[in-house]
Amino acid sequence: MGSNKTSSVTINRIIFILSLAGMLMAIYVLQSFLRQSSIICLTGGGCEVVRNNPVSYPFGIPVPAFGLLGYLGLTILSFLRSLNQKANNYQLISNLMLGIAIFGVCFVTWFTLMEIFVIKGVCSWCAISTVNMYIIFFLILIGLRKKLTQSSNVKSQI
């Protein structure tokens, strides 16, 4: 049982680090969107093509702002989850994290499709963020599965 707890703690730490990294990426790209300045693109000029396209501003809001909010929420919740291991609070925080991650995966998938088929350019930072969000999503699912398995093992011992 100790290894299950350790692996849950490790998964949560990885989620925290990935969320923090996502937040930093979103801040970098968002400041470029807001200042209308170039982005250092790791793959050429795709970032500028994306930044200059109206699709990158749904409801007038720059896409990186959505990423920043999502990653900020995941960073805060993963930190709170590390402090509070009580079953009810842990489950509530985990469910909130899962909800944010589901929205995040849907959003990055939508935006990636927009980049490929509408904008016709791919931003390397957006691609990294997409992979990052998918990894976080799967880690949350793995963590929830471990917790469910752990709690069902405890109930079966009673």
Image: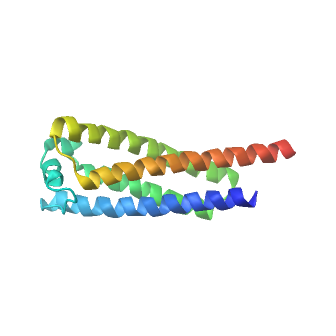
Q: Residue 118's quadrant in the figure?
A: top left
Q: Residue at x 43, y 59 (%)?
A: 19
User: Residue 81: horizontal and vertical position, in percent?
Assistant: 58, 58
> Between 15 and 67, which is closer to the camera in this rendering?
15
Q: Using the image as rendered, state which of residue 151 and residue 76 is in the foreground.
A: 151
Q: Does residue 149 appear left or right of residue 115 in this picture? A: right
Residue 69 falls left or right of residue 57? right
The count of marks equals: 0
- The quadrant in which the C terminus is found is top right
Q: Position of residue 7 (x, y in %)?
A: 64, 58
Q: Farthest front residue?
A: 43
Q: Position of residue 134 (x, y in %)?
A: 43, 47
Identify the residue at horizontal 71%, vertical 59% (top origin): 3
Q: Quadrant location of the N terminus? A: bottom right
Q: Nearer the viewer, residue 34 or 155?
A: 155
Outermost residue, right direction? 158
Q: Residue at x 18, y 41 (%)?
A: 55
Q: Position of residue 32 (x, y in %)?
A: 18, 61
- The vertical placement of 10 against 92, above or below, is below
